[in-house]
Amino acid sequence: MDLHFEDLQKLLNKIDSDEHRRQFTQVMTWIAKNYPDFNMAIKWQQAHFEYNGTFIIGLNIAKQHMSFFIEKAGVRQFEEALKKAGYTYTESLYKVKWTDEMDYDLLKAVIDFQIADKRANSVASRKTM
């Protein structure tokens, strides 16, 4: 992973709760373990995971939740699954409250979709999807 420890520490220090920091770190560790070819960088005060130079998913933190930026195509593809999991979502991201259980099967499906869809579309970021 291409990451400066100081940047990651600054991001983690924004999380007031030790338990929330642990949860966020657990998700990032899960992604790193399951997708070892990903590069991670801190951009725009969030963790960005990229594969072969292409953005796949971004993680951000808020007081009540963590957000997963997956772009419009990803949200559209998983809208029903997000509803079923009880996650709120917007046009291009979904939110997991700190009190919610993390659905790692859904996260894996989202990431795998992002990889396949971007490979098929040969674009770094879907601007119109």
Image (cartoon, rainbow, N blue to C red):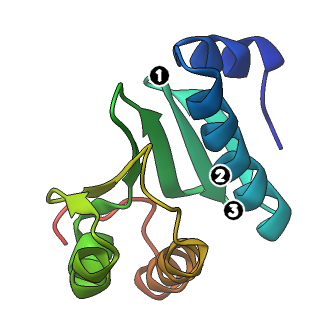
Say whether residue 25 is left or right of residue 64.
right
Q: Amino acid at mark 1?
A: Gln
Q: Which residue lies at the image location 69% right of the left edge and 42% below the top edge?
A: 40
Q: Is residue 63 above or below residue 6?
A: below
Q: Is residue 78 visible?
A: yes
The residue carrying mark 1 is 45
Say whether residue 110 is left or right of residue 21.
left
The residue carrying mark 2 is 27
Q: Amino acid at mark 3?
A: Asn
**Front position in the image: 102 or 57:** 102
How many other residues sit within 10 Å of disc 3, few (<14), some (14-19) or many (≥20)?
Answer: few
Q: Position of residue 100 (x, y in %)?
A: 42, 56
Q: Amino acid at mark 2?
A: Val
Question: Could you say which disc has been placed on residue 107 in the image?
Answer: none
How many other residues sit within 10 Å of disc 2, few (<14), some (14-19) or many (≥20)?
Answer: some
The mark nearer the N terminus, 3 or 1, is 1
Q: CA distance from mark 3 to mark 1?
A: 21 Å
The residue carrying mark 3 is 52
How many other residues sit within 10 Å of disc 1, few (<14), some (14-19) or many (≥20)?
Answer: some
Q: Secondary structure at mark 1?
A: loop
